[in-house]
Image: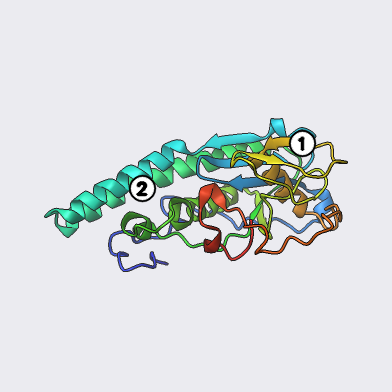
């Protein structure tokens, strides 16, 4: 059993992929070609925890979204409380008990959200959940004690990703990943790298594309679904290369671009 990686692992041990939940059978059903499956892209974020969009959906407005604001508020409150306990005279057992209780409740909430996504996906023919290839491992103690830690990348997003895969296994749903690079900046309609004038919105810069300004999370979910299939992305790109230094990569819910290995 893996433990949390930081020096505080005695406070936050256990594996967020399996805690309180049986992973069931492996979520890799009998192999079939991508053309036989309905890819459902699932974009993860903080304020919108899961956004699911099937590749076949013609209008991004039909995407299924689950808010994450409550989880964010609970993580913030737990951080403040742990800081107060560490600054006071609370003993180790008190801190351990509080963190474990709150962590268990957070995992239950994540599992409930993941079940909603799996219920939604199950309505489609031969569904496969498609998420980005996350580079992060959950480290709750880092979020609770490191002032420079980002709430999403430290714990919430990698744990949400792991819990979704575990719950999908219970449902017998296949879950797979695709490259994350620029998935939040690529237009689902034409493949052009567009703009994010506001965090919540995406604007396509291709004048010949039908897509104008759309919900960013729904667009990203559709892009992830499209990446499941080979040779399905438009080859069109702006004539000028968009090097990393010319356009900073956007990351989930405001994290520092320097914290990601890939632009996303």
Residue 124 seen: yes
Say which of 225 and 123 sits in front.
225
- In front: mark 2 or mark 1? 1
Say which quarter of the image contains residue 89: bottom left
- Residue 259 rendering spot, x and y as whole percentages: 52, 62
Q: Please tell me how many numbered marks the rendered image carries.
A: 2
Q: Secondary structure at mark 2?
A: helix
Within 10 Å of disc 1 (Cα), the crowding (few <14, some 14-19, many 20+) is: some
Q: Which residue is mark 1?
A: 212
Q: In the visual, does 122 lie left or right of 3? A: right
N-terminal label among 2 and 1: 2
Local SS, label 1 = loop
Q: Position of residue 32 (x, y in %)?
A: 79, 56
Check residue 14 in the rendering and tell me which mark sits there, or answer none.
Answer: none
Q: Which residue is mark 2?
A: 104
CA–CA distance in space, label 2 to label 1: 42 Å
């Amino acid at each position: 059993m893996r433990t949390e990686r930081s020096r505080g692992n005695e406070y936050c041990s256990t594996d967020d992929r399996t805690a309180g939940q049986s992973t069931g059978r492996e979520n890799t059903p009998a192999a079939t070609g991508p053309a036989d499956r309905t890819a459902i892209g699932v974009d993860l974020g903080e304020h919108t925890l899961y956004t699911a969009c099937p590749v076949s959906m013609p209008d991004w407005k039909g995407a299924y979204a689950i808010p994450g604001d409550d989880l964010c508020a609970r993580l913030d409150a737990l951080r403040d409380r742990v800081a107060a306990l560490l600054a006071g005279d609370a003993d180790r057992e008190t801190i351990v008990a509080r963190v474990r209780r709150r962590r268990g409740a957070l995992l239950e909430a994540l599992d409930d959200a993941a079940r909603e996504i799996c219920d939604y996906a199950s309505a489609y023919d031969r569904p496969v959940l498609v998420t980005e290839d996350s580079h992060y491992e959950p480290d709750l103690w880092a979020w609770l004690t490191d002032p420079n830690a980002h709430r999403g990348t430290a714990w919430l997003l990698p744990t949400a990703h792991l819990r979704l895969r575990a719950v999908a296994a219970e449902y017998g749903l296949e879950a797979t990943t695709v490259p994350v690079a620029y998935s939040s900046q690529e237009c689902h309609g034409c493949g052009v790298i567009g703009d994010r004038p506001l965090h919540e919105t995406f604007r396509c810069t291709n004048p010949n594309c039908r897509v104008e300004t759309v919900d960013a999370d729904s667009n990203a979910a559709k892009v992830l679904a499209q990446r499941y299939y080979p040779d399905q992305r438009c080859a069109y790109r702006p004539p000028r290369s968009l090097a990393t230094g010319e356009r900073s990569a956007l990351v989930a819910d405001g994290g520092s671009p320097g914290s990601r290995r890939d632009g996303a």
